[in-house]
Image: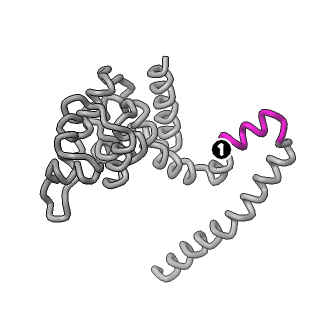
Amino acid sequence: MAADDAYARLAGTLERIQRASGRAELSEVLDSAHLSYETGIPETVVLTLLAGGRAVDISVAERVRQRLDFLRETRRRADGKRYALEEIAAAAGVTRQTMSEWRKKGIPGLESADRLRRFFSLPPGFFFADEPEALDEALQQRLQELESRSDPFAELRTPEILRLAARGLLSPTGVQAMAQWAEAVTRPVAQSVHKGGRGGEGLAS
């Protein structure tokens, strides 16, 4: 059931991205290689998920093993070389032997995994999140960018605001007032951009 929920959320996010971008193909607005790098999911699996398919079910231990190997292959030192196993172990605050056990059993301690995550600036849940959940999380920033471009009031439609409205704690008048406030704030920016564009056209002519 949890997996079905994760796939449903991902499908909803992809639908919103497609609608906000106005593009028929998600490949025109999403970089599968970058998404793979961000999530630790193989690019072939990312492409499958973007097409509405499902990833092969694997255990948490296997997922951790895969992402540890992915991490070592894709994150390099300043000199371009791979991190030695000892260096990764030191970043996690464990011994090389413990790191070797992780690669065999795929069960790191939460504190050590978090140290490793922070050392490499990885997103929360990098090692443990299942594929649809990890991809959905990685897509949120792109979704926000696209919706902000197509709808200047998109940022007001947060779960908190919608929850207040649904409970009757935020009246229609309150919602309208917030919309008017947002319009007043964004209008000077829009006018400035418009004038700048017209000024540029005048110079060009």
Up-down relation of residue 104 to residue 31 (above or below)? above
At horizontal 80% and vertical 47% (from top left) the residue drawn is: 175
At horizontal 61% and vertical 50% (from top left) the residue drawn is: 151
From the viewer's perspective, tell me whether residue 73 is left or right of residue 161: left
Q: Secondary structure at mark 1?
A: loop
| Secondary structure mainly formed by the magenta segment | helix
**In the image, farthest residue toward the bottom:** 203
From the viewer's perspective, tell me whether residue 193 is left or right of residue 165: left
The x and y percentages for residue 86 are 16, 51
How many numbered markers are drawn?
A: 1
Camera-side residue of 70 and 167 = 70
Up-down relation of residue 112 to residue 130 (above or below)? below
Residue range highlighted in magenta? 158-169
160 magenta-colored: yes
At horizontal 51% and vertical 29% (from top left) the residue drawn is: 9
From the viewer's perspective, tell me whether residue 130 is left or right of residue 41: right
Q: In the figure, residue 131 lies in which quadrant? A: top left
Task: Determine which residue is flagged by label 1.
Answer: 158
Camera-side residue of 155 and 42 = 42
The x and y percentages for residue 140 are 49, 44
| Disc 1 packing (10 Å; few <14; some 14–19; many ≥20) | few
22 magenta-colored: no
The x and y percentages for residue 148 are 57, 52
From the viewer's perspective, tell me whether residue 153 is left or right of residue 79: right
Q: In the figure, residue 136 lies in which quadrant? A: top left
**In the image, farthest residue toward the top:** 1
Report the coloring of the rendering.
one colour
At horizontal 50% and vertical 76% (from top left) the residue drawn is: 201
The amino acid marked with disc number 1 is Thr
Up-down relation of residue 76 to residue 140 (above or below)? below
The x and y percentages for residue 168 are 84, 36
